[in-house]
Image (cartoon, rainbow, N blue to C red):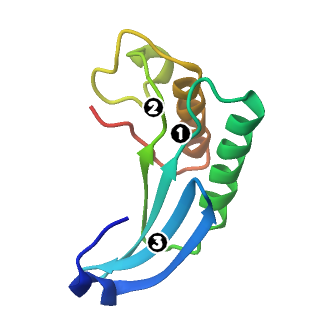
């Protein structure tokens, strides 16, 4: 995560979770926001590597001590098909004509958090 030097004073903490994940907690206006920056394994990575990544993401998000917003961003190496009927709670907008395994994993992650009362939407 890059930011201007003058904004660094607003960072309360940062933590490297793995070589693929970083958490930064910073204040924006009067609200604390947790940013989870990710770089997911590529589609052709081993299944175990992908499972480890999404398990770590799940554990990380569940353990955050953030009372404000949580923003998960980065490269999920995911392609998400526009299947609003199947994933209507997490897909907002168009999507693609195709999908991949990482896309399915991302949708499942978002849907599981929705079930926990947390709203995750994939942008249009």
Q: Quadrant of residue 46?
A: top right
Query: Residue 19: image x %, image y %?
Result: 60, 57
Query: Residue 105: image x %, image y %?
Result: 60, 30
Q: Is residue 106 above or below residue 104?
A: below
Dot 3: element: strand
Residue at 31%, 37% (x, y): give it. Answer: 123
Looking at the rendered image, the disc whose residue lies closer to the viewer, 1 or 3, is 3
Q: Quadrant of the C terminus?
A: top left
Residue at 40%, 18% (x, y): give it. Answer: 84
Viewer-proximal residue among 1 and 105: 1
Q: Residues within 10 Å of mark 2 (few under 14, many from 20)?
A: some
Dot 2: element: loop
Residue at 73%, 44% (x, y): give it. Answer: 52
Viewer-proximal residue among 122 and 21: 21
Q: Which residue is mark 3?
A: 24
Q: Which mark is residue 110?
A: 1
| Left or right, 47 with reference to 29 | right
Q: Is residue 26 above or below residue 75?
A: below
* Label 2 – label 1 distance at C-alpha: 9 Å
Q: Are marks 1 and 3 in contact (CB under 8 Å)?
A: no
Residue at 61%, 23% (x, y): give it. Answer: 44
Q: Which residue is mark 2?
A: 89
Q: Earlier in the sequence, mark 1 or mark 3?
A: 3
Q: Earlier in the sequence, mark 2 or mark 1?
A: 2
Q: Are marks 3 and 2 in contact (CB under 8 Å)?
A: no
Viewer-proximal residue among 36 and 39: 39
Viewer-proximal residue among 49 and 122: 49
Q: Quadrant of residue 25?
A: bottom left
């Amino acid at each position: 995560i890059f930011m201007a030097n003058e904004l660094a004073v607003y960072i309360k903490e940062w933590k490297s979770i793995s070589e693929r994940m970083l958490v930064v907690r910073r204040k924006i206006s009067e609200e604390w926001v947790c940013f989870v920056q990710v770089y997911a394994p590529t589609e052709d990575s081993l299944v175990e590597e992908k499972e480890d990544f999404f398990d770590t993401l799940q554990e990380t998000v569940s353990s955050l001590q953030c009372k404000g917003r949580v923003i998960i961003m980065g490269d999920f190496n995911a392609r998400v098909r526009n299947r609003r009927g199947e994933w209507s709670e997490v897909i907002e907008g168009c999507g693609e004509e195709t999908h991949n395994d990482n896309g399915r994993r991302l949708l499942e992650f978002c849907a599981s958090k929705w079930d926990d009362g947390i709203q995750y939407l994939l942008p249009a």
